[in-house]
Image (cartoon, rainbow, N blue to C red):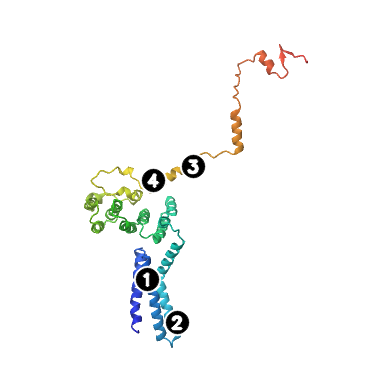
Amino acid sequence: MYFVAPIFLVPFFGWGLVMLYRRYRLREEWPMWVEALTIVALALFYTVEIEELRVWLHHQRIAYFFSVLGLFVAGLALYGHVVVSLLSRLIVEVVAPGDEDIRDRPRFGPAEILERRGDWEGALQEYLILLRIFPRNAVVNQRAAECCIQLKRPEDAIKWLERAVRYLPPDESVLPLLSRICEIYDRVLHRPDDARNVLDRFLDEHPAYPHADAVRARRRQIGAADSLERPVDLDALAQTPIEDGALQEEAPKRAKSSRRSRRQRKLERQDAEIEALDACPAPLPDSQTEEVTLRNDLPEVVPLDATESVAPEDEALDSPRGKSNGAPLEPL
C-alpha cells in the first residue's frame, strides 16, 4: 500500500494536464461518459490518498491537514472544469424540453444580432458558449471561423474551419470549407505545405469521396505563381462568403455573384423588412381620421373668377334680404 499512493500521483497529474490541454488549447469537449469516468476515478484517488496520508501522518496533524488541502487544491486546478462541465450538461438534460430536435438545435439569435451591429468579438464569444453545448456542430464551428476572419485572426479561423470539416458529412458541403482553408494557408499565411497536408489528410480519411477530383485539382493549384502574386486583402476575404469559394469541378457552375450564403440572404431580407416598416407612415388618430372622412364627403366648391358678373336674379337670390331691380322687397 505504501507504493500505491505515489503511483496514483502520476496519472492524477498526467491526465489532468491532458484534459486541460484539450479543453483550453484545442478547445475540444470531452464526451459525457469520459467526464463521468474521470470524476469516479478522482473519487477513488482521493479515497486512497487520504487514507494513506492518515496512516503516515497520524502523529502530525498539521502536516496531515495541509497535505490533504494541497491535494484538493491540485484537484480543483486540474479537474475543476470537468466537474463544472459535467454538472452543466446534467442540468441542461434535466431542464431542456424532451423534443430532441429543439434540444439539439443551436440558437444563433444573440450572435446574429451582434454580427449585424459589427460586434464580431461579442459574436465570437456567443459562438464559444454554443460550442460548449454543441462541440461537434459544424455550423457553430464555421461561424466561429467567420468571426475570426472578420477579426483578422487567420490562425484561429483555420482551427475552427478544420474542426467544421471534421464534423461535416463527406459530401459537397465540405468543398467551400476546404477551399477557404487552402486560401488562408496559401495566400494569407504563406504556408502551402500545410494546405496540401489538409487536403491529403482529408482524401486519406475519405478515399471514396465523390468530389475527390475537385480536391486534387485544387491541390495542384496550391503554391502557384499567380496565387502568390495576387495581393492579399483580409477585408475582402471577410466580405466574401465561404460558399463563394467552393472548389471548382469540371461541371459548369453558376456565377459567383449569384451565390450567396443562406444566412446573408436572411439578414438582407430582415433589413428590407425593417426599411419597409420605417417607410410606412404612422397611422392617424381616430379624431383626425374622422375629420378627413368628413372633409372628403363635402361637395366640391368651384370659385368664381373675378371677371365674372353675378346675374341680377342670382344676386337677388343670394342677397340675405332679397332685391328686385335694386328696390327692397315689401314685407308681407
What secondary structure is found at the residue carrying circle 1? helix
Q: In this figure, which residue is indicated by the disc labeled 3?
A: 277
The amino acid type of the residue labelled 1 equals Leu
- In the structure shown, which secondary structural element does the residue marked by tag 4 occupy? helix
CA neighbours of label 4 inside 10 A, class few (<14), some (14 to 19), many (20+)? few
Question: Which image quarter: residue 318?
Answer: top right
In the image, taking residue 313 as reference, residue 246 lies left or right, namely: left
- Depth check: give the residue in front, 234 or 108: 108
Residue drawn at point x = 31 percent, y = 56 percent: 165
Mark nearer the N terminus (1 vs 2): 1
Considering only vertical position in the picture, is 307 above or below 182?
A: above
Name the residue beneath numbered marker 4: 265
Judge the density around disc 1: few (<14), some (14-19), many (≥20) Cα neighbours within 10 Å. Answer: few
Q: Quadrant of the N terminus?
A: bottom left
Callout 4–callout 1 Cβ contact below 8 Å: no
Q: Is residue 66 above or below residue 180?
A: below
Query: In 3D space, how far apart are the residues under numbered discs 4 and 2 (Cα atoms)?
Result: 63 Å
Residue bearing mark 2: 65
Q: Amino acid at mark 3?
A: Leu
Dot 2: element: helix
Inspect the image, locate mark 2, and give the three-letter code of the amino acid beneath it. Phe
Earlier in the chain: of badge 4 and badge 1, it is 1
Who comes first in sequence, dot 4 or dot 2?
Answer: 2
Foreground of the two, 169 or 327: 169
Residue 11 screen position, x and y as percent: 33, 75
Residue under circle 1?
A: 37
Q: CA distance from mark 4 to mark 3?
A: 19 Å
Q: How far apart are labels 2 and 3 at the CA level?
A: 69 Å
Residue at the outermost top position = 325
Q: Quadrant of the C terminus?
A: top right
